[in-house]
Image (cartoon, grey):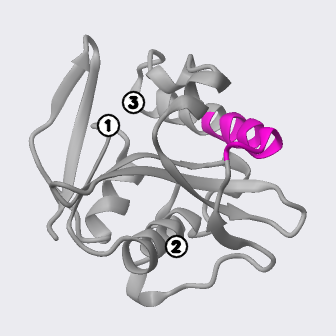
Amino acid sequence: MSDNDLASPSSRAPIPPGVLIRELDLSDATVASAVHAVGLRAYAVEAELIGFDGIPALTESLPDMTAQPLRWLGAVTGEETVAAFVAWQTDTDRHVTHIDRVCVDPVWFRRGIASRLLDHLLTEVLDGGEVSVSTGADNQPALKLYERLGFRRAADFEPVPGLRMAQFVLPG
């Protein structure tokens, strides 16, 4: 990601021509495989940025990924290529949504896709409530993205030794 990916949602920068934002159906094996591959490529870049190659998603199998109780929103090209995705889960009792993963295929970096996906999720899909997300504490592009979208940084945490995570919250 770069500053181009970090455009504020109010700017409503257009996504690249031919790219549509839509819900993804991971029961479709082709879609699930594409999402899994994008995630592996994106997390490999994050691992390099944060200096930690033990990110759990890097070793997650396709069946394990599709078994997650998540909803998926993607940026998909006219050729049906998944350029990026966001996955989330909402606790309807507490009215809290946790964004589980935000991934952009490295070939699609610097085009504002992550900003647009998250903006779409926050304004068109979710119906309010608190939203939380976490990222590697040294992943500067992601930190800037969440801050620009209005998230506030909460306490950092270490889920496994050597992996420091930054937690962000967007109040409802």
Question: Which of marks 2 and 1 precedes in the sequence?
Answer: 2
Which dot marks residue 116?
Answer: 2
User: Label 2 is placed on what type of residue?
Assistant: Arg
Give SS at disc 2.
Answer: helix
Give SS at disc 1.
Answer: loop
Q: Which marked residue is nearer to the observer: mark 1 or mark 2?
A: 2
**Dot 3: within a 10 Å radius of its alpha carbon, few (fewer than 14), some, or many (20 or more) residues?**
some
Residue 22 placement: quadrant: bottom right
The vertical placement of 28 against 145, above or below, is: above
Which dot marks residue 138?
Answer: 1
User: Label 1 is placed on what type of residue?
Assistant: Asp
Per the image, the residue denoted by label 3 is 50
Q: CB atoms at circles 1 and 3 under 8 Å apart?
A: yes
Highlighted magenta segment, given as a residue range: 26-39
The vertical placement of 117 against 61, above or below, is: below
Residue 146 placement: quadrant: bottom left
Residue 37: give x, y in percent of width and height: 72, 35
User: Label 3 is placed on what type of residue?
Assistant: Ile
